[in-house]
Amino acid sequence: MQAGLRNQLELLTDLLAERSTGVLITLDEIHQNQLAELRELATTCSTRSARAASSPSSARAGASVSDVVNDDVLTFLRRAERHSLGSVARADVERGFREPNRVRGASHRRQPALQVMVDGAAGYPFLLQLVGAQTWRLHPEEEEFTSVDALEGVARARRRLGSLVHEPALSAASEHRHFVLLAMVAMTALPRWPTSSVASA
C-alpha cells in the first residue's frame, strides 16, 4: 500500500511541477492513536522529498499534536511551523453559529438559545464545532433551536470533548500529574487560595 501511495505521489507531483504548482496534503483531527497511519504517510513524503525537487507539502491540525510530535519516527513534525489557536472572540463564536443556519434557511430568532450555545462554547475552537454539531443533530429538520436544545447540545458537546481530548490526555499522564490536576480542581472551590499552593498540597 505504501509503494502504491508513493508511486501516485511521484506521478502527481511530477505532473503538477510542469505547471509550476504542487500537492498540499491536509490532515485534520490528528491524534496519537493514528501513529501507524501518520508514520506511513510521513515515510512516503520524506522519501519523495529526498529524491525529487518537487515534493508534497502538508498541513496538519489536531488537539493532540503535542503528543504526536514526540514520536520517534515523526521527528520532522518537531521542525514544522506551528500555529496555536487562541480563544475565539464572542462575536465570532456567535457568527459561527448564526451564519451556517442562515445559509440553510434557518434563523436564530430565539436569542436565548443562541446565547446558551455561545456561552457553552466558551471561545474554545473545537468546542465551538462540537456544540454546533451536537445541537443541530438533535432536530436537523427544524428551522430553529430552542434553549432546551441548546442546553442538551452543550452537554453532549462537553461529554464528547472529554472523550476525544481529555480522556486520551489523562490516560498518558503520570500518577504525579494526576495528583497535581486533582489538587488544582479541588482548589477552584476555595476562594483566594493561590495556585502556587498546589506544590505544597
Image (cartoon, rainbow, N blue to C red):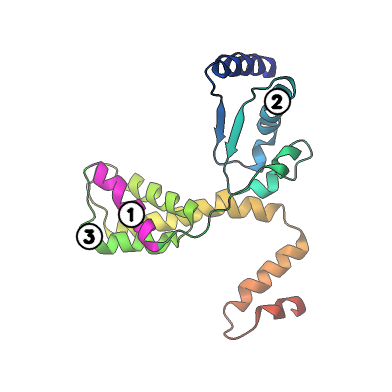
User: Which kind of residue does numbered mark 1 sit on?
Assistant: Arg
Task: Give the number of the disc on residue 49.
Answer: 2
Mark 3 or mark 2: which is in front? 2
Which circle's residue, 1 or 3, is located before the other in the chain? 1
Name the one closer to the observer, 161 or 115.
115
Magenta residues: mostly which secondary structure?
Answer: helix
Above or below — where is 127 with respect to 141? below
Q: Residue at x 65, y 53 (%)?
A: 169
Location of mark 3 (residue)? 110
The span picked out in magenta is 90-104
Element class at badge 1? helix
Q: What is the residue that sits farthest to the bottom in this orientation?
A: 192
Q: Residue at x 25, y 62 (%)?
A: 111
Does the magenta-highlighted stretch encompass residue 91? yes
Classed neighbour count for the residue bearing mark 1: other residues with Cα under 10 Å, few (<14), some (14–19), many (≥20) = some
Label 1 to label 3, Cα distance in Å? 15 Å
Label 2 to label 1, Cα distance in Å? 41 Å
Classed neighbour count for the residue bearing mark 2: other residues with Cα under 10 Å, few (<14), some (14–19), many (≥20) = some
